[in-house]
Image (cartoon, helix red, strand yellow):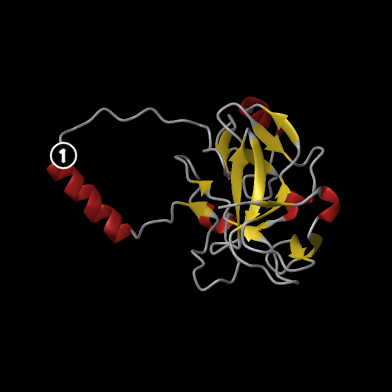
Amino acid sequence: MGISKSTAKEQPFEVRSSRVHGKGAFALRAIKKGTRVVEYLGERISHGEADLRYEDCDVNDNHTFLFVVDKRTVIDAGVDGNDARFINHACDPNCESEIEDRRVFIDAIRDIKPGDELNYDYQIGRERGDPPNVDEIYACRCGSPKCRGTMLWPPKRAKKKAKKRAAARSVASKPRKPKRGTSRAKAGSRVATRRTTRKAKRRK
């Protein structure tokens, strides 16, 4: 997709109160599909620093300005960040995040009308050790007919289907050594630090 770039002085949106969550970003003029809307800016820190920085955050708080760039770098838009940090999540979004040369950009993936709220899918990963109410903590209120009810990804499978699949796997496959897990969220996702034990873990 060809990207139409704009400068910071030409920022095509404003920040104001949102019905979805807190503050949001709203188009000031028509934004064509393929437009590079804004770069996601903030202090660039390591995953370890991000964990330490938000180690004491409330496990029930889903508010975050952290964005994973790669396995080494996280952008904390809470420090020296710009208005990109106010773009809310949606399950059927009009924008998407793109990583180029270790920089994060928000691009329009459909035509956006003046007054429309900008949004993209945060794709917050699920983890072992998530609290039972994690979907409630990260509830989505985007209002889309396609809303999955949560900012988490992948969508939570129905218990019956999950049990059937697990049973089928246990019968059809040989025992395998489990893969090693990772505490790092995938690149291109918004994250937050969850503290489910004394040690901070990667989340949102």
- Is 108 on the left or on the right of 16, as rendered? left
- Residue 110 lies, in percent from the top left, at 59, 64
- Is 34 on the left or on the right of 6, as rendered? left
Query: Residue 66's image quarter?
Result: top right
Is residue 114 visible in this depiction of the protein?
A: yes
Residue projecting furthest to the right: 9
Q: How many marks?
A: 1
Q: Nearer the viewer, residue 63 or 66?
A: 66
Q: Residue at x 49, y 69 (%)?
A: 146
Is residue 133 visible in this depiction of the protein?
A: no
Q: Quadrant of the C terminus?
A: top right
Q: Residue at x 53, y 52 (%)?
A: 134
Q: Nearer the viewer, residue 5 or 85?
A: 5
- Residue 123 lies, in percent from the top left, at 53, 50
Secondary structure of the residue carrying numbered label 1: loop
- Residue, disc 1: 173
Q: Label 1 is placed on what type of residue?
A: Ser
Q: Residue at x 60, y 32 (%)?
A: 200
> Compared to 64, does 200 lie above or below?
above
- Residue 36 lies, in percent from the top left, at 68, 52
Query: Residue 88's image quarter?
Result: bottom right
How crowded pointer 1 is (Cα within 10 Å; few <14, some 14-19, many 20+) is rated as few
- Residue 92 lies, in percent from the top left, at 54, 64
- Is 61 on the left or on the right of 29, as rendered? left
> Compared to 177, does 195 lie above or below?
below
